[in-house]
Image (spheres, rainbow, N blue to C red):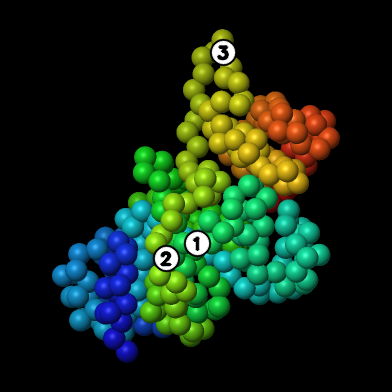
Amino acid sequence: MNLISYALQARARGFHIFPVEPYEKTPHRLSPGQPYTLRWGEAATNDVGRIIDYWTRWPDSNIGVACKPSRILVVDCDIPKREYALAGTQYAGLHDTFGSLVDGTDVFRHVCESLGQSWREAYDTYRVCTGSLGCHYYYLWPEHVRPREASQASLVKGLVDIRCNAGEWGGYVLGAGSVTAKGAYVSENASAVRPAPPWLVELCRRREPVRVSATYRQPGRLGSLAGLVSTVENAQEGNRNQALLWAARAACADGVALDDVLDALADAYAAAGGDGGHRQAEATIRSAYRLQERK
């Protein structure tokens, strides 16, 4: 099996790629039988000559797509590995709708819609069906936005994971044409890679520290909270409480003081017409902090 044609297709999409061991997910070994592998971040390339050289030397190699040099992030939606995998999470209610087994794409769709993002727009991007019958959703990372330190984020670990642009090289995924013991990676469509949904960028961007003088305390609605406030303000009716819960958990994860979050997000929720007004918003925010701190 020669994967060079798939490698060149990935290159035509603008992806920076590198060889991965046949039927595996680890970078290609430098020598047969040896433990040392390619430094994949340095090996990743969009140069046609280097790509032809790689896949002439190792024609059966799987295709690694490096996120950072490709300026993409990838949402990895998997199939559930056990029943009631969402129990104890903020998405547990989805079991009432979908039963004991909830697919990662169902969670991803729910989050998009609850935050006011059109699922049709989020879905209409380049997608690859994975060997385990999950789905990779490819999105463009915006220029001039600094990513978070970690190369991966998760909505539900193992079910909805995000390969980001962070670190020296970012994360990577297997590209279309690759094959593992679980099956082949197949392009689902020929769509272009679309810009990442704003809430997804907000989840994966770096939070810059807010510097204030000893005599002035910056209001909580400014600085790193601005994007989260916007998320709550723009959430669709019926989904504002879910948006508020998500935004408060994100703020807690970033180490933002509860008092600042109470002021900023509760005001946004009440101004947007959220059920229960400011009092309900405060209760939801406090609950979100308790949930996040128990993680």
What secondary structure is found at the residue carrying circle 1? Answer: loop
Say what amino acid the circle numbered 2 marks. Ser
Say what amino acid the circle numbered 1 marks. Asp
Q: Which of marks 1 and 2 is nearer the N terminus?
A: 1
Residue at x 72%, y 72% (from the top left corner): 101
Residue 89 is situated, as x and y percent measured from the top left of the image, at 73, 56
Left or right position of 121 against 293: left
Q: Is residue 174 visible?
A: no
User: Would you place residue 14 above or below residue 242 in this image?
Assistant: below
Left or right position of 294 against 135: right
Residue 282 is situated, as x and y percent measured from the top left of the image, at 78, 33
Left or right position of 86 against 120: right
Task: Quadrant for the N terminus, please.
Answer: bottom left
Quick one: which residue is furthest to the left in this view?
49
Tag 1 and tag 2, C-beta contact below 8 Å: yes
What secondary structure is found at the residue carrying circle 3? Answer: loop
What secondary structure is found at the residue carrying circle 2? Answer: loop
Q: Nearer the viewer, residue 99 or 170?
A: 99
Task: Name which quarter of the figure residue 275 lies in.
Answer: top right
Q: Which residue in the protein does label 2 denote?
A: 191
Residue at x 24%, y 79% (from the top left corner): 55
**Pointer 2: residues within 10 angstroms few (<14), some, or many (20+)?**
few
Q: Nearer the viewer, residue 149 or 246?
A: 246
**Pointer 1: residues within 10 angstroms few (<14), some, or many (20+)?**
some
Q: Earlier in the sequence, mark 2 or mark 3?
A: 2
Residue at x 35%, y 78% (from the top left corner): 62
Task: Name which quarter of the figure residue 104 lies in.
Answer: bottom right
Q: Which residue in the protein does label 1 denote?
A: 124
Q: Which residue in the protein does label 3 denote?
A: 216
User: Distance between the Cα atoms at labels 2 and 3?
Assistant: 49 Å
